[in-house]
Image: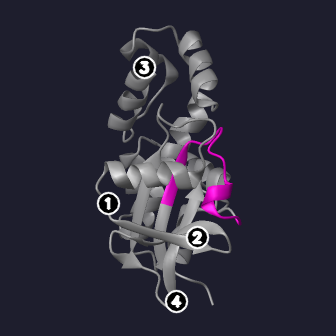
Amino acid sequence: MDAAIQYIEKNIRHTISLSTVAQEVFLSPSYLSRIFKKILDVNFIDYVNYRKIAVASEKLALSKLPINYIANQIGFQQTSYFTKIFKQRTGLTPSEYRHQNTSIQKIFTIHRDITWQESDTVFDVSKRYFQKNDIAYFSQPVNGYPYFNNISNLADSTGSRGWIYTVDCKQPTVPSSAVSIKGKSVVQWIYTAFAN
């Protein structure tokens, strides 16, 4: 599984199929599909698509690259298909996402790997990711839940900017320590302006 995940990560900017990954890790496609679901609790195509949409959302928010170029960079040959998948996952078209997220300053993307445990929360896997990658962070309790208010020296500022998080490209309405990662593919921490 680790080899399969590493192959997906290295090739996320290309077209990725179950049969290609299975061949790369010397398994049959049906067996890889079964163990992918069993070990990660997410199916192969959802995992790949959420990873691709996470990469696309970073590019849409932090660059001015054309949408068709971004689609091509992450392995979608047709921009219309990319737009369809992006909207299914985020609820927005790529252009709507870009327009609504012009104030994003930084994004940390944490993709699922085999170290995620069933009992982990988004807070748990995020904290481990920051520690493993030597990313400075500070958390403190807010309403009894731990909250990251400073990551990589970008801190909350009097209610105008701060850190939000998404899980599989959607923003939960509960603290990160209350969200299980069971069945999830990707977490993103986003430093942005808060809506008034």
Of callouts 1 and 2, the N-terminal one: 2
For image coordinates 55% across by 56% down, the residue present is 123
Which amino acid type corresponds to the residue marked 3 in the rendered image? Thr
Say the numbered circle drawn on residue 135: 1
Q: Secondary structure at mark 3?
A: helix
Which amino acid type corresponds to the residue marked 1 in the rendered image? Ile
Residue with the most extreme right position: 173
Q: Secondary structure at mark 4?
A: loop
Which amino acid type corresponds to the residue marked 4 in the rendered image? Ser
Say the numbered circle drawn on residue 160: 4
Q: CA distance from mark 3 to mark 1?
A: 34 Å
Q: Nearer the viewer, mark 3 or mark 4?
A: 4
Which residue lies under the disc numbered 2?
96
Quarter holding residue 31? top right
Of callouts 3 and 1, the N-terminal one: 3
Q: CA distance from mark 3 to mark 4?
A: 46 Å
Q: Which residues are magenta?
A: 173-188
Q: Secondary structure at mark 2?
A: helix
Out of 64 and 123, give the one closest to the viewer: 123
